[in-house]
Structures are given as structure tokens and as C-alpha cells.
Image (cartoon, rainbow, N blue to C red):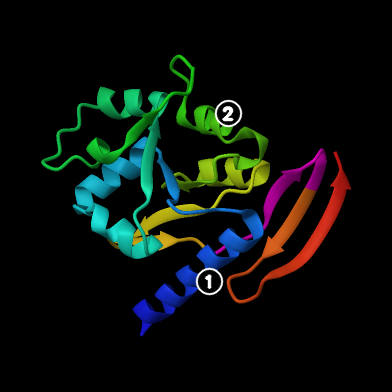
């Protein structure tokens, strides 16, 4: 029963993202290195992402995150990073938080989902940009319910409150 409820919730979230925020297929997921490590340890495959998004998403990792990931000398039998395109970020050795903040600047222009295990990173990104998150819980991929996020549109700061049960519930507009 919980699985069916999660599938319905995911469809609702994806539909809201498509209609309200112009997300489109193929969905683009950008990983941070700790999330990749966790996926490899739990031996999840690409098929889990296909089931989560009801389509075939594109996987990315930034150059900075990839350097950090490879520097840890993690040798996994089926390394998930082989499915990821390396996104050129133009940085030299920034930490993941700064790198992703820079990549996602200007309102998440490329409509990335961020796959992360780092709560500090989630808080930073959700306070700056509108970003949907994916996390891993008990070897299950979870598409997080949309929550209060900050969204920039045409030099205006729009704070939007969204819940998984309802569409937009509250919108406050502040001049930037």
C-alpha cells in the first residue's frame, strides 16, 4: 500500500513540476559524490531511477564533485558514476555546496533534480533556488515532496509554498 501511495505522490509531484515550473523529459539529475557512494553501497541500478521518473532520466555530476568522488578511491563493482555525464563547471576544486550553488544559479535554468544525502546542502539550495531533491532511505529512492522554496522570476523574488496534497497554497511576492 505504501508503494502505491508513493507512486501516486511521485506522479503528482512530476506533474506539478511539468505544468508549473516547466520541467520536461528527459529529467536531469545532478548527483553529489556522497549520494553516488550511497547508491553504490546499496547496489541500486539505473532501473530504480526509471521507475521513479516513469521515463529515462539523464544523469550528471559536476567536475568538482567527480574529482572529490574519485579522490576517495572508491572501487565499486558496478560504479554508478559510469552512467553520469560530467558537467563542466569551470571551477578548480570548489566544494560540492559552492559548485552546485553556482551551477544552479539563475533559477535552476536547466531544471535539475539534485540527488543528495547532505542536509546542509539541501537547506542551502532550497533557500536560494527552486530545486526538487532526491534522497535515499532504506535502499529506496525518494522524490521529496515539494516544499517551501525560493524562486526568482524577472528580478522578483517569489516565495512559493507547495505541498504534495495540494497545488500552490501560498505565494508572496517581494521586490528583489
Q: Position of residue 22 (x, y in %)?
A: 61, 54
Q: Residue furthest top?
A: 92
Q: Which residues are magenta?
A: 145-157
Tell me the residue at 80%/40% (across/down).
Answer: 154
Q: Residue furthest front?
A: 25
In terms of secondary structure, where does tag 2 sit? helix
In terms of secondary structure, where does tag 1 sit? helix
Q: From the viewer's perspective, is 89 left or right of 77?
A: right
Choose top left, top right, bottom left or bottom right for residue 162. bottom right
Choose top left, top right, bottom left or bottom right for residue 134. bottom left
Q: Position of residue 101 (x, y in %)?
A: 57, 33
Tell me the residue at 20%/26% (across/down).
Answer: 73
Q: From the viewer's perspective, is 136 left or right of 166?
A: left
Q: Residue furthest right?
A: 175
Q: Is residue 10 magenta?
A: no
**Residue at the disc numbered 2:** 102
Q: CA distance from mark 2 to mark 1?
A: 29 Å
Q: Position of residue 18 (x, y in %)?
A: 57, 60
Tell me the residue at 51%/63% (across/down).
Answer: 14
Nearest to the observer: residue 123 or residue 53: 53
| Count of marks placed on residues | 2
Tell me the residue at 24%/42% (across/down).
Answer: 80
- First in sequence: mark 2 vs mark 1: 1
Q: Residues within 10 Å of mark 1 (few under 14, many from 20)?
A: some
**Residue at the disc numbered 1:** 12
Q: Residues within 10 Å of mark 2 (few under 14, many from 20)?
A: some
Nearest to the observer: residue 100 or residue 74: 100
User: Height in image: 45 above or below 91?
Assistant: below
Q: Quadrant of the C terminus?
A: top right
Q: From the viewer's perspective, is 156 left or right of 90?
A: right
Q: Is residue 151 magenta?
A: yes
User: Height in image: 147 above or below 104?
Assistant: below
Amino acid at each position: 500500500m505504501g508503494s502505491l501511495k508513493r507512486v501516486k505522490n511521485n506522479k503528482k509531484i512530476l506533474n506539478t513540476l511539468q505544468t508549473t515550473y516547466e520541467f520536461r523529459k528527459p529529467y536531469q539529475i545532478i548527483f553529489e559524490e556522497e549520494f553516488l557512494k550511497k547508491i553504490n553501497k546499496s547496489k541500486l541500478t539505473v532501473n530504480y531511477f526509471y521507475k521513479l521518473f516513469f521515463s529515462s532520466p539523464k544523469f550528471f555530476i559536476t567536475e568538482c564533485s567527480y574529482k572529490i568522488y574519485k579522490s576517495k578511491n572508491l572501487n565499486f563493482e558496478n560504479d554508478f558514476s559510469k552512467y553520469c555525464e560530467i558537467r563542466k563547471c569551470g571551477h578548480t576544486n570548489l566544494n560540492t555546496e559552492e559548485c552546485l550553488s553556482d551551477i544552479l544559479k539563475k533559477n535552476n535554468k536547466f531544471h535539475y533534480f539534485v540527488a543528495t544525502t547532505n542536509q546542509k546542502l539541501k537547506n542551502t539550495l532550497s533557500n536560494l533556488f527552486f530545486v526538487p531533491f532526491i534522497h535515499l532511505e532504506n535502499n529506496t529512492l525518494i522524490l521529496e515532496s515539494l516544499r517551501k522554496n525560493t524562486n526568482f522570476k524577472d528580478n522578483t523574488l517569489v516565495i512559493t509554498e507547495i505541498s504534495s496534497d495540494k497545488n500552490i497554497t501560498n505565494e508572496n511576492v517581494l521586490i528583489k
